[in-house]
Image: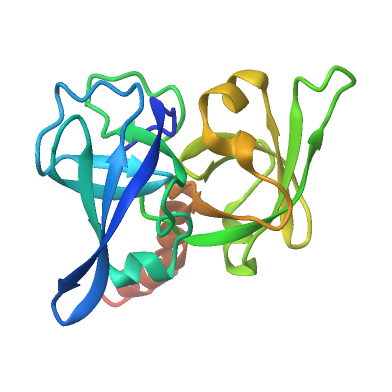
Amino acid sequence: MFTGIIQATGKIIGINALKQSGENGLCLVVYPGSMDMSDVSIGDSISVSGVCLTVTELPDSLFTVDVSPETLSCTCGLNKIDQPVNLEKAMRLSDRLAGHLVSGHVDATGDVCRFEASDEDGGNYLMTIRSPKRLLRYITCKGSITVNGVSLTVNQVMSDEFSVNLIPHTLSNTTLNTLKPGLQVNLEVDMLARYVESLLAHSGNRENENQYR
């Protein structure tokens, strides 16, 4: 579990083929940037641009993670050398929840269709993302969304798009400053919205069951 508050930006510096269960995956070698790795052990979870991955090795101030074909099929940004990545270690139960609850299980990729300064001095930027329509029912104005691992607040929801405001701090401390129209991003919707939908969907069935007890 994560918070969507990025601890450091790093870079994928190595990619190796991984043969696992008869399918081809990838083993990534990641440079962690300024992230403190002193408390990281093999088997720990780290969010890499929004994707929860398990540390498999810790060679020379680096770390490696294995990525399955399934994960590669529904995410972006994990298959390029020198790709900058947002990094966050798994949260402790005692940590402050500064962002929102993030599982690191990417729902889908979206397409950046607008990225531009939203005020005169250019400090804040407006980013608009085209989302798969199946996710839009979980995205609401002033609600939370995770974009490449970053917890953001939704400003506006349109027919098949949503927009977020990026403040200078976010741009300086994440890889979102490298985005531009046409690029893809990893999206994870607010898990609370999913639970609410599931509860409502099953509430009618429970009422019917109680009638026949």
Question: Taking the image as drawn, is residue 102 in sight?
Answer: no
Q: Residue at x 67, y 23 (%)?
A: 167
Lateral position of residue 140 relative to residue 63, left or right = right
Query: 118 or 24: nearer the eye?
Result: 24
Question: Taking the image as drawn, is residue 7 in sight?
Answer: yes
Q: Is residue 123 above or below residue 11?
A: above
Lateral position of residue 156 relative to residue 34, left or right = right
Q: How far across and down, in percent of the image, does residue 184 sit?
A: 60, 57
Q: Residue at x 64, y 44 (%)?
A: 179
The answer to which quarter of the image holds residue 155 is top right
Q: How far across and down, in percent of the image, does residue 88 sit?
A: 34, 33
Q: Residue at x 65, y 67 (%)?
A: 133
Specify the farthest residue to the left.
42
Specify the farthest residue to the right.
120
The answer to which quarter of the image holds residue 145 is top right
Specify the farthest residue to the bottom.
22
Q: Is residue 6 above or below residue 131?
A: above
Q: Residue at x 41, y 52 (%)?
A: 81
Query: 157 or 39: nearer the eye?
Result: 39
